[in-house]
Amino acid sequence: MRVQIRGLFPVEAGAQGGFAFGSRPAFPLAKACAALLVAALTLAGCVSQPQRAPAPAALTGAALAAATARVEMREAQVRAVDRLGFSGRVALSNGREGGNGRIEWSQAGDGYRVVLSAPVTRQSWSLTGDAAGARIEGLDGGPREGHDVELLLLEATGLRIPVGAMVAWAAGTRADIGAVGPARLHFDAGGTLARIEQGGWTIDYQGWQPPDVADAATPRLPLRINAQHGDARVRLIVDQWTLDPAPAQGG
């Protein structure tokens, strides 16, 4: 059965609590979403500046342990999903130019498809691929293909970014430590994840689905995300998450 979770855009307040972590296994999502986000930085258009997040404060003891356990549960739930995707709006800036548009992303196993479209120019970009390689369409000069999506993106845009990590962060989880290093988590006063610092990036979570959408199989996912690394900024608003649970194992 397909579970569709629609965004209600609640805003979390007061980022609090920090704790350094080592490795957590990354869920098996291909390096897709951020590749289209970075490709969009070639757009010239209106730059939307993200809101400034409150400075975190410390959680300790049982409150920190409970908040950490909720992050670990979400990571396990996302790893168990057979198919996952989202649709929403994105705004980007590299300090000199930027753009905004719609983003559609879907992932099933090693296969993925991401489409980014600009509302004013009506241009669109798409990234499709699997474990064997990737293809970007919509860039100047025609389609580009390669076995390494990060290298393909670097050659196409001149930008280097941990694309696999960006996909993990979009779902409110830590990226593989082997790719970008250890993560530091920050929580608000209620124990909700408010920020991840990893690989030189700061990812602020400014809105989440309401708590009642989550159960033992369905994670609570972010709706408003701001990510920053130096001059590079990404602002994402998710209108809808789509999850297909993994098939039940036969006896």
Image (tube, grey):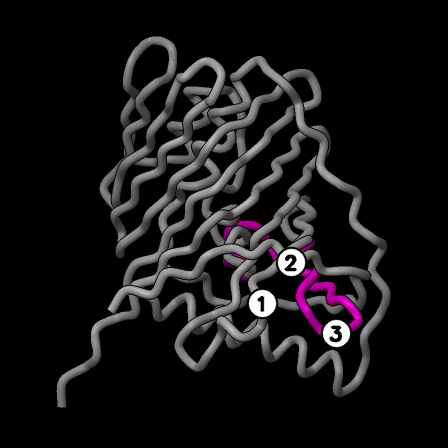
> Which numbered disc, 3 or 1, marks the residue closer to the eye?
1
Q: Work out whether mark 1 precedes mark 2 in sequence or the reverse, and give the earlier one.
A: 2
**Marking on residue 210:** 1
Q: Secondary structure at mark 2?
A: loop
Between 17 and 148, the residue placed more toward the observer is: 17
Mark 2 Cα-neighbour bin, 10 Å: few <14, some 14–19, many ≥20: some
Q: Is residue 53 left or right of residue 160?
A: right
| Mark 3: amino acid | Gly
The percent position of residue 28, horizontal first and vertical second, equals 36, 59
| Mark 2: amino acid | Pro
Q: Alpha carbon of mark 1 to alpha carbon of mark 2: how far?
A: 7 Å
Residue designated by label 3: 190
| Mark 1: amino acid | Pro
| Residue at screen point 43% across, 81% down | 216
Q: Work out whether mark 3 precedes mark 2 in sequence or the reverse, and give the earlier one.
A: 2
Where 81 sits versus 157, above or below? Answer: below
* Contact? badges 1 and 2 (CB < 8 Å): yes
Q: Work out whether mark 3 precedes mark 1 in sequence or the reverse, and give the earlier one.
A: 3
Q: Alpha carbon of mark 3 to alpha carbon of mark 1: how far?
A: 13 Å
State the extent of the magenta-drawn residues as a range. Answer: 173-197
Q: Secondary structure at mark 3?
A: loop
Residue designated by label 2: 10
